[in-house]
Amino acid sequence: MAELIQTQALLRTLPPERERRVGIWVTSREGFWIAFEALRTHKLRSFLTLLGVVIATTTLIVVMSVINGMNLYIAEHIANLGANTFIVHQFKWAQGYEAWLKARHRNQPIRVEDFEFLRDNLSGYKNIGAEAWMGDTVNNEARYKGKTVYEVQITGETPNMIDIGEMKVGSGRYINDGDESHESMVCFVGQDLVNAFFPNVDPVGKEVQINGLPFRIIGVAEKLGSMFGESQDNFVQVPLSSFQKVFRNRPSLAVSVQALSSQQMSILEDQTRALLRARRHTPYKEDDTFGINASETIMESWHQLTASVFAVTIGIVAVFMVVGGIVIMNIMLASVTERTHEIGIRKSLGARRRDILMQFLIESALMAGSGGAIGIALALIISRVVDMFFTSSVPLSAVLVGLFLSTAIGLFFGIYPANKAAGLDPIEALRTEA
């Protein structure tokens, strides 16, 4: 308090313009330290005051981090169908449940004949390949010398699928045209099978039992990692012709079409749609009996879903922020009452209305900003833990929004107490007991 009196006495000796500039800086500095001292002195009160802002900021950043992590993962692993690639399947993947259920019952599966028809009649594509799945992975297993790996994903692939997707050969080779034409009993496997059966041995050339049938390993894929806690390396790929021979005679296919450039994608999609509709004699007024899936479609549907989640989060955050702001306003009103005598002294020594106003606004903003900073630190810890088990990536924008929003709340809800303090009559204020 003595420092404030000395400072204000010194300011009266300065020229008006310089007094104004220096006064604002001194008021801001003193307001900062007064607010800091108030927070340090009343730790429990400060914690309870900032609790709403802390919870709101933490919730906002954690949700934004999880959504951002999911966006990155979906774009990289799920929606990444390959460069300039779309997939023709029985139905569209990204649609509402009712529409998906209707399409599943109405649409016809894509068969090998459809794939061959597209391969022979489409023009201007870079690659076209097909893939078939075993419907239920629960009963799929791989065995080698008494060891068993369960829930193996078994697929039939055309040789050029390695050139379309993101999978890479780690060792050995991929399925080739000779394997496909001769219906060879060979397979390309993921790292999970190698770790289980051949931890210290080269697996290429070894024979494993896939659902009781012998397949010779010709290659191993590079490690893909896990998705939402599920390993993506527990798979076996065999030639599509071999898949038809021993697993599914007429499997449902997903046909991958790779364009030469992104500009050609829409042309190829339209051409594919026209060819399949003509092949299936679909009337022009009826919907497609198949689905064309591109990365953009999947990401658009995913963003629509996350937008709904984020909207709910914003509502929750708004409630906590308002509650936190009201608590801060009440504390600041109590602070004005406690420091009425001090305000009277400062005004009597020449402190202007803006000086008092600035002091209490800074104190309110610092209080809320401190809650935001605590919320950010807590959110970073939670996001790191979530990332260990799921996926989370903290965007810088979330941190900046959290800090800005909390500080803005402090400024907004500090206006009324600051105005009340600045409007006090110095004579009446001095009569108040210190």
Image (tube, grey):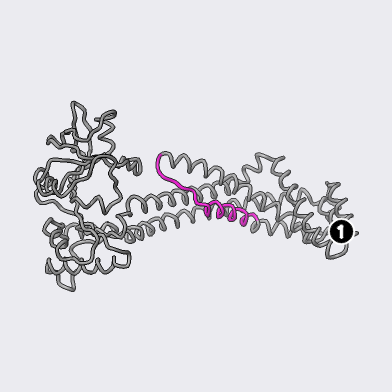
Task: Name the spot of residue 112 as percent of width and height, x first.
Answer: 12, 55
Task: Name the spot of residue 424 as percent of width and height, x first.
Answer: 79, 58
Task: Name the spot of residue 140 as percent of width and height, x first.
Answer: 18, 38
Residue found at the far top of this picture: 146
Q: Which residues are magenta?
A: 389-410
- Viewer-side residue, 333 vs 71: 71
- Viewer-side residue, 225 vs 183: 183
Question: Which residue matches tag 1?
Answer: 350
Residue drawn 49% across the image and 41% down it:
382
Does the segment drawn in magenta span residue 381? no
The quadrant in which residue 23 appears is bottom right
The quadrant in which residue 296 appears is bottom left
Q: Main secondary structure of the magenta part?
A: helix
Residue drawn 63% across the image and 42% down it:
47
Tell me if 158 is positioned left or right of 263 in this view: left
- Label 1 neighbour load within 10 Å: few <14, some 14-19, many 20+: some
Residue drawn 41% across the image and 57% down it:
308
- Viewer-side residue, 360 vs 72: 72
**Image height of 292 relative to 337, above or below:** below
Kind of residue indicated by mark 1: Gly
